[in-house]
């Protein structure tokens, strides 16, 4: 039985501070960048193409307003997406606001009825600004690429990959549960 679905925005919150500070030309220590690169929202998805050093190099280049030499598509996309976030911080904020209010407790009954013998008692939905991948499933964690969150320009709706963001999250949580279903 699933008892809790936690929403984790730690990596996004740390990046909001970074984007705002760099945008305002405030000093940002390299140590802060190292701390960001070590956050679990990133570290859980590191692979041979996208590493802690990829994050550090990209953010350092942005902070220092230097040209970034990407080693692969994932690094390039990560760098470009971070630049995009700083173009219009009000749009970035509109991406974050619905996530800060996100409560997934209403999914507990639905998921428990559908999957009474789910392997995990707690699920975690992590939003992290990533690269080319839409999402990752790692054990009881669903890691969603923050850059694919799209607020509607017409109303208060929010979408991920053209779906209502809550429906998208439910679909991916069901995929997670099915992957590890007893």
Image (cartoon, grey):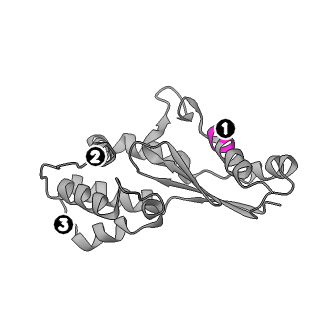
Foreground: disc 2 or disc 3: 2
Horizontal and vertical percent position of residue 113: 87, 49
Residue at horizontal 36%, vertical 57%?
Answer: 48
Would residue 143 be visible to someone looking at this image?
A: yes
**Tag 3 residue:** 27
Quarter placement of the N terminus: bottom right
Q: In this rendering, would 168 be left or right of 58?
A: right
Q: Earlier in the sequence, mark 1 or mark 3?
A: 3
Q: Please give the name of the residue rendered at 75% of the width and 48% of the height, measured from the top-left corner.
A: 107
Which residue lies most toward the front here? 48
Q: Locate residue 155, reporting x and y percent.
A: 54, 29
The residue to which callout 2 is attached is 72
Task: Kindly state the secondary structure of the residue where label 3 is placed.
Answer: loop
User: Seen from this angle, which residue lies furthest top?
Assistant: 154
Determine the CA span between mark 1 and mark 2.
32 Å
Residue 78 within the segment the image draws in magenta? no
Assign the magenta stretch its main secondary structure.
helix
Q: Earlier in the sequence, mark 1 or mark 2?
A: 2
Relative image position of residue 21 (x, y in whole percent)? 25, 59
Q: CA distance from mark 1 to mark 3?
A: 40 Å
Choose mark 1 or mark 3, whichever is in front.
1
Give the camera-side residue of 175 and 150: 175
Instruction: Please tell me how crowded label 1 is: few (under 14), some (14-19), or many (20+) other residues with Cα within 10 Å.
Output: few
Q: Secondary structure at mark 2?
A: loop
Residue sitting at 45 percent across and 43 percent down? 133
Q: Residue at x 55, y 34 (%)?
A: 159
- Give the numbered dot on residue 167: 1
Point out the residue furthest to the left here.
66
Q: Secondary structure at mark 1?
A: helix
Q: Are marks 1 and 3 in contact (CB under 8 Å)?
A: no
Residue 24 visible here: no
Q: Which residues are magenta?
A: 167-171
């Amino acid at each position: 039985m699933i008892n809790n679905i936690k929403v984790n925005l730690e990596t996004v919150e740390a990046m909001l501070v970074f984007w705002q500070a760099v945008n305002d030309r405030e000093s940002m220590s390299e140590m802060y960048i190292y701390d960001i690169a070590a956050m679990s929202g990133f570290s859980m998805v590191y692979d041979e193409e996208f590493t802690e050093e990829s994050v550090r190099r990209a953010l350092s280049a942005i902070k220092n307003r230097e040209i970034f030499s990407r080693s692969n598509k994932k690094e390039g996309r990560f760098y470009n997406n971070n630049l995009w976030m700083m173009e219009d911080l009000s749009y970035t904020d509109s991406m974050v606001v619905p996530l800060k209010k996100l409560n997934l407790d209403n999914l507990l009954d639905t998921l428990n009825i559908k999957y009474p013998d789910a392997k995990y008692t707690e699920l975690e939905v992590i939003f992290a600004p990533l690269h080319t991948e839409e999402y990752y499933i790692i054990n009881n964690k669903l890691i969603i690429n923050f850059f694919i969150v799209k607020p509607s320009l017409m109303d208060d709706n929010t979408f991920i990959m053209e779906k209502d963001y809550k429906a998208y999250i439910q679909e991916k949580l069901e995929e997670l549960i099915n992957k590890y279903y007893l």
